[in-house]
Image (tube, rainbow, N blue to C red):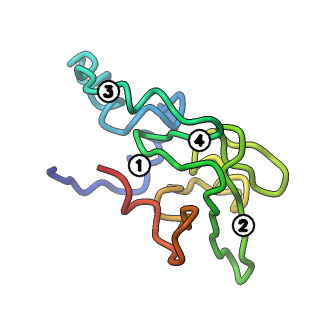
Amino acid sequence: MKSIEIDFDVEKALFLRRTSEEVSYNDVLRDLLRLGPKKSSITATDTVSGQGDWVSKGVRFPSGTEFRATYKGKTYYGKVEAGSLVVENKRYDSPSSAAVAITGNMVNGWIFWECRIPGRSSWQMIKSLRK
């Protein structure tokens, strides 16, 4: 995958054009350039989850997956319950929306959070789970 450098103002403008966490920066650019949506390669395993599992951006987090992040010296914890991420008794549909609720700023949740999947002892950045 290629990358391009953009300044903060461009990133902010792209972020504001995203209608949900499921809309990527690439989707926004494709729309602005009038290229039309990219053909989806979603499979049945991306859309069908186990009871209570949470799927975000094609990554499946089993029910019970723990999340944590440290911000300004405080560690925040969350857990996957009933198909969403629950942090401080509030439900979130995306890692970024939970991160924004904590920080009050535009934050990429995929680099903010780490998780521990049930049955594993180690924590890992959730970004490492994306394809």
Circle 1 sits in a helix, a strand or a loop, which is it? helix
Residue that carries the numbered disc 1 in the rendered image: 11
Residue that carries the numbered disc 4 in the rendered image: 53
Q: Measured from the top left, where is residue 89 in percent x and y? A: 85, 51
Q: Residue at x 36, y 30 (%)?
A: 28
| Residue toward you, 51 or 128 | 51
Residue that carries the numbered disc 2 in the rendered image: 77
Q: Say whether marks 4 and 1 touch (CB < 8 Å).
A: no
| Residue toward you, 107 or 90 | 90
Amino acid identity at mark 2: Tyr
Q: Measured from the top left, where is residue 66 in percent x and y? A: 64, 63
Residue that carries the numbered disc 3 in the rendered image: 43
Amino acid identity at mark 3: Thr
The quadrant in which residue 50 appears is top right
Mark 1 or 2: in front is: 2
Mark closest to the chain's N terminus, 4 or 2 = 4
User: How far apart in space, not on screen, are marks 4 and 3 (Cα)?
Assistant: 16 Å
User: How far apart in space, not on screen, are marks 1 and 3 (Cα)?
Assistant: 30 Å
Mark 4 or 2: in front is: 4
Left or right of 3? Residue 24 is right
